[in-house]
Amino acid sequence: MSISFLRALLRAPHSVGAIWPSSPALAREMVRASALEGTSAVVELGPGSGAFTGHILANLPSGARFLAIEKCPILTREVSAKFPGACIVEGCATRLGHHLAEHDVSTPGAILSGLPWAIFSDDLQNAILHQVRDNLGTDGVFSTFAYYGPHKWGAGRAFRKKLQAHFSEVERSAVVLRNIPPAFVYSCRR
Ligand SMILES: C[S@@+](CC[C@H](N)C(=O)[O-])C[C@H]1O[C@@H](n2cnc3c(N)ncnc32)[C@H](O)[C@@H]1O
């Protein structure tokens, strides 16, 4: 865990929402589930300290645009320094459409989320999912992860239902054991 991640966690635990950054194994599963091949624009929501960012950039089709939107200024600075040249902006996932227009990024074929859904209110979850669905390309994929175990509890089940209400197809990956805690990936299509 980086010092910046720890500082951000202490300063805004209600927004960072994780005790440990995601593992490379989960990052690989997120990228696999997102089917980046052939996409002309890829968006990452909530990159944090960049646990997924390097894997996304390494698999970005040539010529494709990349935009990451991070709410925490400390982490925005850290991840920008880690990946010079990548477009990482301080902003909010609820304003996805605005950030795409502001940075002249075309309709994304893939949106990957590291957002801490479990600590978001119902209204915030809905606002972000509306933005994702409305801005994702017709054949695009939205992927997000959930921790194995809590997904069976009330809030986890409610979140899955919310994904199913916003997207016509919601698939689940196998559980990634090499992550703290173990997690799996939802991939959603409009
Ligand atoms: C749990 S961290 C995930 C970081 C990394 N993707 C990972 O999996 O390790 C969640 C990140 O989402 C950011 N975040 C929270 N709410 C956000 C919002 N509304 N818009 C953009 N980023 C947000 C937090 O600041 C934090 O950096």
Image (cartoon, grey):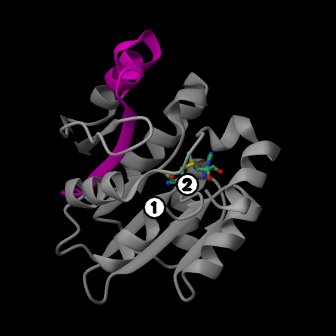
Q: Is residue 114 visible?
A: yes
Magenta span has 119? no
Q: Residue 126 bears which disc, if any?
A: none
Q: Quadrant of the N terminus?
A: bottom right
Residue 60, by quadrant, is: bottom left
Front in this rendered view, residue 5 or 59: 5
Q: Residue at x 60, y 39 (%)?
A: 19
Q: Which mark is residue 46?
A: 2
In the rendered structure, the answer to whether residue 175 lies left or right of residue 11 reads: left
* Residue 44 numbered mark, or none: 1
Find the magenta span and give its range. Answer: 138-162
Left or right, residue 111 beside residue 140? right
Mark 1 secondary-structure assignment? strand
Residue 135 appears anywhere in the view: no
Where is residue 4? Give x, y as percent. 72, 61
Cβ of mark 1 under 8 A from ligand 1: yes
Mark 2 residue element: loop
* Residue closest to the eye, 19 or 97: 19
Q: Amino acid at mark 2?
A: Gly
Residue 43: x, y in percent? 42, 64
Q: Name the residue nearer the viewer: 163 or 103.
A: 163
Mark 2 residue's CB less than 8 Å from ligand 1 = yes
- Residue 129 drawn above or below residue 65: above
Label 1 near label 2: C-beta < 8 Å? yes
The answer to whether 101 appears left or right of 171 in the picture is right
Can you give x and y, in whole percent of width and height, for residue 56 in the image? 36, 70
